[in-house]
Amino acid sequence: MLKLDTVLAIGGLEDASRVARAAEDMGFAGIFTAEATQTPYLPLAVAATGTERIELGTAIAVAFPRSPMVHAMTAWDIHKASKGRFILGLGTQIRKHNERRFSVEYDRPGPRLRDMILAIRHIWDAFDGKHKLDYHGEFYTHDYIQPFFNPGPTGYGQPKIFVAAVGPWMCRMAGEVCDGIHIHPFHTIRYIEEVVKPNVREGLARAGRSEDDFEYATTAFTLAGDAAQQSALAGLARNQIAFYGSTPAYRGVFELHGLDHLQPQLQTLMREGKMGEMMEVVTDDVLDLFAVRGEFDAIAGALREKYEGVVDRLGFYLPVIGSGQEDRWEAVVKEFPA
């Protein structure tokens, strides 16, 4: 079963409930926020009290600017307010954002994130009364909380934890300690099948867990509409693929397809500020590795053909609510389970 998700794209917090309700009414399974121009948590807190069915998640909250206790308490509040519909998605972001945007340390981000996730689970177990708070990890320590500060159980169990991952180590870690993985939109089906999944399975096996208890989620560059609409959306997709492709962390996706030369080429053009030339590097053949094209009456089938059986949750890179084509998208969404 392939669940269809969307993004909670809003101008301000005052829009969060309306947009989330619209997504719920359209039949989306989940709605996710990103840590971009707004905190990912506050819009979901607003949306939690204005919706009844749709799952709510961060995709992603940047991990290190907040302590495990802050993540744990915030997620706990939203999970309780939504009556058990919250998914905590965490990611490391890159060094520059951590050190220069958030002014936090970025030492050994993979092991640090793993330690944070273990700390959050320990904190939640303490909230549930399973044990006293007594976590001593490599990076984080939490061993003091008075009953006055313990919120107690949510009544709806604990939130799921997803992690954003690209490389093999992070995929293994996701399988070992998480409930799901957010696969970056800069992906190909071959990369998911040959790199992401084998490493997730290795992590699951290491923890004695089954893939039945794990979810693969991703976002697709979706070029839907008539020829003119697809052409316009293709330009936006080329721009983003070129941007992501210029980053060394994503080089492995190109390498798997024998396109090793593209990442350094894009990186050089990025440094020179030649965005137009960067987009030219993303030829139609390269674009089709990453994107899905189709008329509105065929796009659901195209998405299913590419992703069904590969991932469990699929979202669109661009928001649907506010696109001006909600009526066309509603017919697409209805072809997927809510």
Image (cartoon, rainbow, N blue to C red):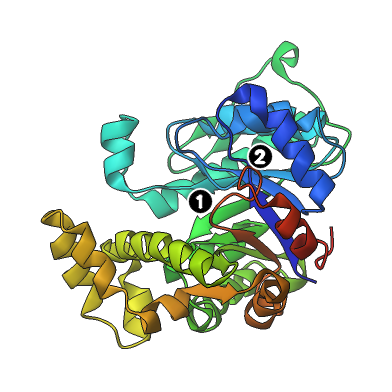
Mark in front: 2 vs 1: 1
The answer to whether residue 272 is seen in the rendering is yes
Res. 74 visible in picture: no
Q: Return the x and y of residue 51 as percentages of the image width and height.
A: 82, 35
Q: Amino acid at mark 1?
A: Arg
Q: Are the two marked residues, 2 and 1, in contact with CB atoms closer than 8 angstroms? A: no
Among numbered discs 2 and 1, the one appearing first in the sequence = 1
Task: Say which residue label 2 marks.
Answer: 122
Q: Secondary structure at mark 1?
A: helix
| Residue positioned 81% across, 34% down in the render | 82
Left or right? Give the position of 30 relative to 193. Answer: right
Left or right: residue 107 versus residue 158 is left
| Quarter of the figure with residue 180 | bottom right
Q: Position of residue 247 (x, y in %)?
A: 28, 61
Element class at badge 2 = helix
Q: Looking at the picture, how far across and down is residue 334, in whole percent? A: 83, 62
Classify the position of the C terminus by image quarter: bottom right
Camera-nearest residue between 119 and 195: 195
Would you place residue 281 above or below residue 3 in this image? below
| Amino acid type at image mark 2 | His
Whole-Å distance between the Cαs marked 2 and 1? Answer: 12 Å
Residue shown at 82% from the left, 68% from the top: 335
Looking at the rendered structure, which numbered label has been put on residue 304? Answer: none
Going by the image, does 291 lie left or right of 105? Answer: right
Q: Is residue 335 above or below residue 161?
A: below
Residue designated by label 1:
114
Bin the neighbour count of mark 1 within 10 Å (Cα to Cα): few under 14, some 14-19, many 20 and up. many
Q: Residue furthest bottom?
A: 258
Quarter-wise, where is residue 309 in the image? bottom right
Task: Identify whether 304 is placed above or below 222.
Answer: below
